[in-house]
Amino acid sequence: MLALNFKKMGGLIPAIVQDYKTGDVLMLAFMNQAAWEQTLKTGRATYFSRTREVLWVKGLTSGHIQRVKEIRVDCDNDTVLLKVEQVGGAACHTGYASCFFKKVEDGTLVHVGQPVFDPKEVYQL
């Protein structure tokens, strides 16, 4: 199996997630060794939650899963780029297609785009 360098960040590596068709950056998450292996095994993006300290399969609750189409590894083997099919059209837990829906304009943050879903309904908040 491909050996990634999980040592630099205390057992984690950044995972940049990109839409495989459009090239849009959807999110940034982290993987530990177990998340990496699960992603390779299942073809579904699996990450490590730094807050909850558990593995999480993207979309397990919302249904907005990420099917991995291609994986690229950087020159130091310590960052991965996942090119995914984003099922349901939204990668962000706030309902937006991308987690990067805030744009800096004249020193303020402006929301760009419209939410794809209402998180209160999906996550039953």
Image (spheres, rainbow, N blue to C red):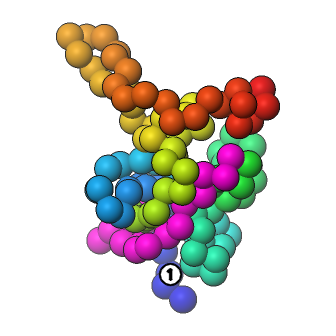
Establish if 56 lies above or below 101: below
The location of residue 5, given as percent across then percent down, is 48, 70
Q: Nearer the viewer, residue 52 or 115?
A: 115
Q: Quadrant of residue 38?
A: bottom right
Q: Is residue 29 left or right of residue 33?
A: left
Establish if 57 lies above or below 51: below
Q: Which of the image's four quarters has the N terminus?
A: bottom right
Which residue occupies the extreme bottom position in the image? 1
**SS state under label 1:** loop
Q: Residue beneath label 1, please?
A: 3
Amino acid at pointer 1? Ala
**Looking at the image, can residue 77 be seen?**
no
- Classify mark 1: residues with Cα within 10 Å, few (<14), some (14-19) or many (20+): few
Which residue occupies the extreme left position in the image? 106
Q: Is residue 91 left or right of residue 11?
A: left
**What residue is drawn where x is 75% and y is 43%?**
52
The location of residue 36, given as percent across then percent down, is 58, 70
Q: Quadrant of residue 16?
A: bottom left
**Looking at the image, can residue 105 be seen?**
yes
The location of residue 62, given as percent across then percent down, is 68, 46
67 inside magenta stretch: yes
Q: Is residue 102 left or right of residue 27?
A: left
**Bounds of the magenta span?**
62-79
**What residue is drawn where x is 54% and y is 57%?**
87
Q: Quadrant of residue 105?
A: top left
Q: Is residue 28 left or right of residue 48?
A: left
